[in-house]
Image (spheres, grey):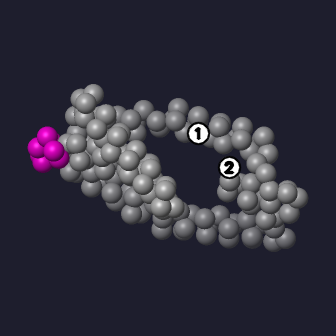
Amino acid sequence: MGIIAGTLFSAGILKTFYIPFWVVLMAHAAIGLGTMAGGWRIVKTMGMKITRLKPVGGFCAETAAAISLLGTAMAGIPVSTTHTIAGGIMGVGSVQRFTAVHWGVARSIMWAWVLTIPISGIVSYAVFLLIHRFFPAA
């Protein structure tokens, strides 16, 4: 919501910086649709495919992730919640026994993390070129 409002403000569409209600609704809709479309896959991967979690292990992973996020937030460091919980889950599995973690799944997750930024940059560059080509005044 902040990025969209910032873009609207920078483009001069908003005279003062605030988050319009329609932006809030659109963000809620996007999050809801994303969760509906792929949320269960993420939950299944985190809770069952990295390692088998029991309730106490889930509690420990969530607590570790929350403490990490609190510390980084207090230091002003932006950190992904998904990264922290995945690390917590891997840590819980490793404590049980090192082979309890399915390291192939963990490796796939880590590759996705590494590739997200450059691929996002390439896609945004391509979208910019398309928009600039078809709407030169924009």
Apparent side of residue 123 relative to residue 95 in the rendered image (left or right)? right
The image position of residue 75, as x and y in percent, is 47, 61
State which quadrant residue 51 falls in.
top left
Apparent side of residue 26 relative to residue 48 in the rendered image (left or right)? right
Apparent side of residue 43 relative to residue 93 in the rendered image (left or right)? right
Q: Residue at x 33, y 57 (%)?
A: 110
Q: Residues within 10 Å of mark 2 (few under 14, many from 20)?
A: some
Q: Is residue 16 above or below residue 66?
A: below
Range shown magenta = 94-100
Q: Is residue 101 above or below residue 39?
A: below
**Marker disc for residue 31:** 1
* Label 2 sits on residue: 1
* Cα separation between marks 1 and 2: 11 Å
Apparent side of residue 67 relative to residue 5 in the rendered image (left or right)? left
Q: Residue at x 75, y 70 (%)?
A: 132
Question: Would you say residue 96 sits in the magenta stretch?
Answer: yes
